[in-house]
Image (cartoon, rainbow, N blue to C red):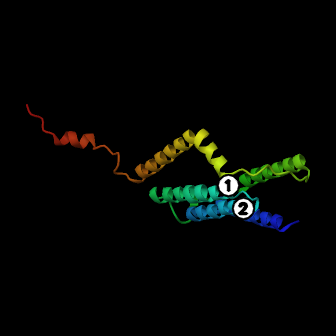
């Protein structure tokens, strides 16, 4: 076992541990911070696997944008920041299902690869990836940006009760005088 293998396993353990803490904590803001730790550990795994571009995309998009969007949504919708009793549900069904799925995936991977080494494909260049992204994937990126903008506008509208409220029609009709 090489040093890269040990580092990969350690970062994987940090990612799994912080992922468990994301779903186990009762504090919503702490869950967001544990998510940052989990996604950062995954970026570290990508660096160990010499996929630097994927690691930077992981940091910039997921850690930078998605988690910041999550924390802004929490702040804008005035969600409870401290411990919430609404989140206190029995966790044994989820743990049982998650453990079963994890064991099934582990058995599937061991059966598929039988601890054999896999040859890595030739490394791509940033220029080739950029050509693929900006030729074939421009429309999905634009649609995603419009979707995220709509979600942010929706969060602002939900957080402000004075936006979108119509004047009370009963109150306005009682103020008008009827002339005979």
Q: Which mark is residue 35?
A: none
Name above or below for residue 39 compared with residue 129: below
x, y percent for residue 45: 73, 61
Which residue sits at x=31%, y=43%? 166
Circle 1 residue: 54
Q: Secondary structure at mark 1?
A: helix
x, y percent for residue 58: 64, 56
Q: Quadrant of residue 14?
A: bottom right
Q: Is residue 74 visible?
A: yes
Which residue sits at x=33%, y=45%? 165
- Mark earlier in primary sequence (1, 2): 2
Classify 10 Å Cα crowding around label 2: few (below 14), some (14-19), many (20 and above): some
Classify 10 Å Cα crowding around label 1: few (below 14), some (14-19), many (20 and above): few
Per the model, the C-alpha gap separating discs 1 and 2 is 8 Å
Which residue sits at x=92%, y=50%? 114
Q: Is residue 167 left or right of residue 57?
A: left
Circle 2 residue: 47
Callout 1–callout 2 Cβ contact below 8 Å: no
Q: In front here: 20 or 144? A: 144
């Amino acid at each position: 076992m090489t040093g890269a293998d040990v580092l990969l396993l350690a970062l994987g353990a940090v990612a799994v541990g912080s992922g468990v803490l994301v779903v186990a904590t009762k504090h919503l803001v702490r869950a967001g911070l544990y998510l940052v730790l989990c996604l950062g550990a995954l970026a570290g795994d990508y660096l160990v696997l010499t996929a630097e571009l994927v690691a930077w995309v992981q940091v910039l998009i997921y850690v930078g944008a998605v988690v910041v969007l999550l924390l802004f949504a929490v702040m804008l919708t005035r969600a409870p920041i401290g411990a919430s009793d609404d989140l206190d549900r029995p966790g044994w069904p989820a743990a049982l299902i998650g453990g079963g799925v994890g064991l099934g995936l582990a058995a599937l991977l061991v059966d598929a690869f039988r601890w054999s080494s896999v040859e890595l494909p030739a490394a791509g260049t940033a220029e080739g990836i950029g050509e693929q992204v900006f030729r074939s994937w421009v429309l999905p990126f634009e649609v995603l940006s419009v979707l995220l903008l709509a979600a942010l506008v929706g969060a602002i509208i939900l957080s402000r009760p004075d936006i979108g409220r119509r004047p009370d029609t009963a109150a306005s009709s009682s103020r008008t005088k009827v002339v005979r």
